[in-house]
Every structure is written in structure tokens, then in C-alpha cells.
Image (cartoon, coloured by chain):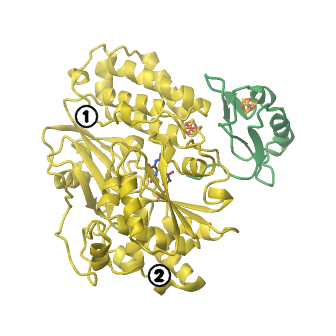
Chain colours: A green, B yellow
Amino acid sequence: MSAPNPEGLRLQVDMIKCVGHASCAELLPERVTLDEWGYPIIETDPLPQHLVAHARRAVAACPTLALRVDGKVARVR
Amino acid sequence: MTIMLERGARQGGRAQPGPLPRLLAGGRKLGEHRATYGQIPLRRFASEDGRRKLVRAVTDAGLRGRGGAGFPTGLKMASVAAGAKRPVVIANGCESEPASRKDKMLMVCAPHLVLDGAVLAAHAVGADRVYVCVERGTSVADRLEREIAHRDDPVKWKLVRVPRRYVSSEESALVHLINDGDGRPMAAPPRPYEKGVGGRPTLVDNVETLAHVALIAAYGPEWFREVGTRSDPGSTLVTIGGAVARPNVYEIAPGMRLGEVLDAAGGAVEPIGAVLVGGYFGTWVPMPDGWGLPLTHDRTGPLGTSLGSGGIVALPAESCGLAETARIVRYLAEESAQQCGPCMFGLPAIATDLAAVAYGRCDPATRQRLTRRMAQVKGRGACRHPDGATKLATSALATFADDLETHMDGWTCTGVSRDPVLPLPDRRHRDRSWK
Ligand SMILES: Cc1cc2nc3c(=O)[nH]c(=O)nc-3n(C[C@H](O)[C@H](O)[C@H](O)COP(=O)(O)O)c2cc1C
Ligand code: SF4
Ligand code: SF4
């Protein structure tokens, strides 16, 4: 059911750009929940293939361009 | 200011540097420094091949960053050197950590060892420019500027006076300050080693790390490994404070036990309840249970204790560790750059919960909320500031678990009325601006 996408794409957020607008949590509840202050808690493991398109939609809907889908890992240490 | 060292007297003669001290054996003036450590061995590492040899020497030596994270320095150098553009070096001497003053001491007592290391690091990665970053409002910047004027180096030096804010010394904040005059951390990617000052690959190294690079270049990786542990070789500077007889900066060998390190500082002057290891991003180690804990840059013990930035503070058993922690987490919350929601809202909320716990207005719900909030905030900032703050708070809840029970029962311990032991900067010596 949830085979990971072959390119290792992940949904990630730039917390500095994010303003807690929360449209991502509505569009992709499978991967995004909100903390008590309304900021997204994002599951950053590689996306299952069937969610890649949904994730891209969430990226496009973010008003501050804080989200991205790519294979880079933001934090290594 | 006196320097007290863990063992051994000064060993003169550069052919056979003694075991310890290594970093603090030279002098403040260029002449004294050269008499102890010799000329910068740039010639030995001439040409492209030489650069690679130098990076390999640092890698083989197993040197790890002394700025807190303990990342392998050789690996970082190799990544920076592999970039497409000409790299830049930043020497991070800000030491915003209130429980630490080893970098300031090193820059005052052995400025040329740090500068030699910066020249060698620049050479290793192919950089021609070194930014030396120090907190403004201290005399260190002026001193360094004077010492640099006496030198003749193949790099261009730039002294950067950094706002006195806890997070302005984080590496992306330094890059941000140099590029745009804004000392707040930036989001990754890109990280400074990929794209930093002027879009160039940027090597950010702590000043003590750079001093070790100079020693490795002069004496070789095998010599470097003669002290320390296999995975954390070389000597390291620690700042020991709190209830010890001789609080000061000491040069120790990683692997030494916590109790031995305290003894080196004259031992406890009253019964010790716990020791903070690793500064304000560190962990509380319960005493006397933690006496035998070996201190290295690797995570050890049940709380993942590591030397971090080397700040060690002995807390008397009579003091309240929860109140001390609440005060520090409040400070860290105030020092947030207020850019990321979880850090901006989470840290003050955690600080408030901790204060409630410490001052006896605690109930199981507060405690649960605290645990949940700490888990929520961790790892969710653009920089590691919230991770450090929650690590400290988490270790406090574990180490002072018994005290916590007492506080939960509605008792306030007498410790909360004692003078705080953990140092904080005077508000007048903190900057509000990010420029
Ligand atoms: C909030 C924050 C503050 C920091 N402050 C310092 C500092 O004062 N000095 C320092 O050397 N590193 C500091 N660091 C670590 C730097 O970002 C960076 O990792 C370090 O300078 C790299 O040098 P090293 O590899 O030699 O340790 C800080 C990190 C964070 C997250
Ligand atoms: S939609 Fe964008 S701004 Fe809004 S919470 Fe999600 S990431 Fe943040
Ligand atoms: S995590 Fe905190 S300190 Fe770090 S960039 Fe975000 S708001 Fe600033």
C-alpha cells in the first residue's frame, strides 16, 4: 500500500518561513499534524508514492513557500 | 587570570611537546609563541597535494569540533574543499555560552596558535580569507586585531564583532551577519559548508578546534592521538565552575572521569548534588553516581552526556536543580531569534512549566504537558537552539526526579531561595539588536 517513492522525496518545512497558516495540515493530514501553537509537525521520512502528488499540492498551497518536496535532508546534526 | 592545568608543568622545547598542556604552553606574544611552537609548517603542505595531505592529517588525527557538536573536523574540511567556488574560513570565537570561557582564555593566552590554525585551515581548503568572529563589547577583538597586525600571513583577515546573543554565534547566523548584517540563524539547506559567505563554501570552526589544527600540522596525527580516547583524541579545554575550590579553565584529556575532572579543579567545597556537563545545551549528571562517567565528545551514560562546549558546573546538593534549570531555560527562551514557531512559543511555555514545577505549583498535568511540549519542540527549529534547551530540561527532569516528586507533593525545597549557581550574563551586557 505505502511503497516509498523511488527518488526518496520528502516533505520538509522551512520553519523560519512558516507562519503557522495550517493549510498543509488540511491538505495532507497523512503527513502533517499541528502543534498546540498551530505550527506543522511533519513526518519527514520519504513519502509513500501515492502521497507525492498530494504533497506537491500542499507545497503549492503554502502561502509563504515554506514547504518543499525534495530528497535533501535539512539537518544532519 | 591564571591558567591552571590538569597535570604536568610546562614542557619547553618544541621538538618534544609534553603530554599536557598542549594549547596553553606557548605565549601571548608572537615571539614567545614561535619559540614554543615554531613557524607555521605551510611549506610542508605546499601545492595541491600538500593541501590534501593536511586534510588527511586532520582526519587521521580524529580531531572533533570543540564548539559543541563534536563533528569530525577533517570531514568538514574535505566537504568545503570539494566545493566549486573558492572557500572561506570563519573562526568562531564568540563563545556565547555563559558557562564557558575557554575560548576567550585561549584567544588571550595563545592568540597565535588560533591564528596559525586558521591560516592552516584556510590553506587546507584553499581559502584566502578568514573571518575571525568574536563577541562585541569584550577586549578580545581589539587584542586579536593588534596581534594580527604583527603577523604576515597569506590570508586576508577580517575581524567581525558579533552581537552578544546566544544564537548569533550559531554558524548560519555568522554567515547571515557577514552577508547581510543580520545575526539570526538561517534555515538549511544550504548549510554554510555548501553555500555560506558570499555564496562560497564556508568552513566554520571553533577557535579551539583551529588551535588543534595548528598542533596537528606541527606534530602530526600520531602525536595528537597520544592523549584522549580512540574516538575523541587530543586534549580539550573545559571551564569548571560552581562549588569547586578552583573554578577555572583546564586542559584535560577526553576520557577522564567526571570526578577526576572536578578534583583537578580543587574538588568540591560542599556536597555536590549534580553536575551540569556541556554548558546550557548539556545534561545534568547526578552525583555521586556520575563520579566515574568518562567525559568525551561522544554521548555517554543514560542521559547522552557529552562534553559539548566544555562548560562544567558543580551544583551543591543544597541548591535546587529544577529552579536552576527553569532560570536557564527562561534565559534560552529569551535568547531565541523568534523566527520559528516551536522555538518562539515552545521555549517560553516550557520555561513557564519548569518554573511552576520548581516553585511548587506543580501537578501531574503540568508535568505531563511539560514532557509533551519538550518532545514537540525538539528538532523543529531552523537551528539546534530548541534541541539544546530541551535536552537540558529533559535531563533536569530525570536527574532531579526525586526533587520533582517532593515539589509535586506541594513542598517547596529550601534550595529555591539559595543564590543561583549557574552563571548568566548581566542584562546590560546582552544586545537586543541583531545587527
Ligand atoms: C544556538 C547555538 C549557539 C552556538 N554558539 C557557538 C559558539 O558560541 N561558539 C562556537 O564555536 N560554536 C557555537 N555553536 C556551534 C556552531 O554552530 C558550529 O557548529 C561550530 O562553530 C563549528 O565549529 P567546530 O566544528 O569546530 O565545533 C552554536 C550552535 C548553536 C545551535
Ligand atoms: S501551509 Fe505553509 S505557512 Fe502554513 S503551516 Fe503549512 S508550512 Fe506553515
Ligand atoms: S530555532 Fe529558534 S533560535 Fe534557531 S533560528 Fe529558529 S527561532 Fe531562531
Which image quarter holds the C terminus of chain B?
top right
Picture quadrant of ligand 2: top right
Can you tell which quarter of the image residue B98 is in?
A: top left
Residue B74's place in the image compared with B389, above or below, is: below
Q: Are marks 2 and 1 on the same chain?
A: yes
Q: In the figure, is residue A44 to the left or right of B370?
A: right
Which residue in the protein does label 1 denote? Answer: B421
Residue at 35% x, 59% y: name it. Answer: B107
Task: Name the element at disc 1.
Answer: loop
Looking at the picture, tell me which residue is in the foreground, B129 or B18. B129
Q: Is residue B332 visible?
A: yes
Q: Pinpoint the chain carrying mark 2.
A: B
Residue B42 is marked as 2
* CA separation in Å, label 2 and label 1: 45 Å
Residue A38 placement (x, y as % from top left):
66, 23
How far across and down, in percent of the image, does residue B235 sit? 32, 65
Amino acid identity at mark 2: Leu
Q: Where residue A53 sits: x, y (%)? A: 87, 40
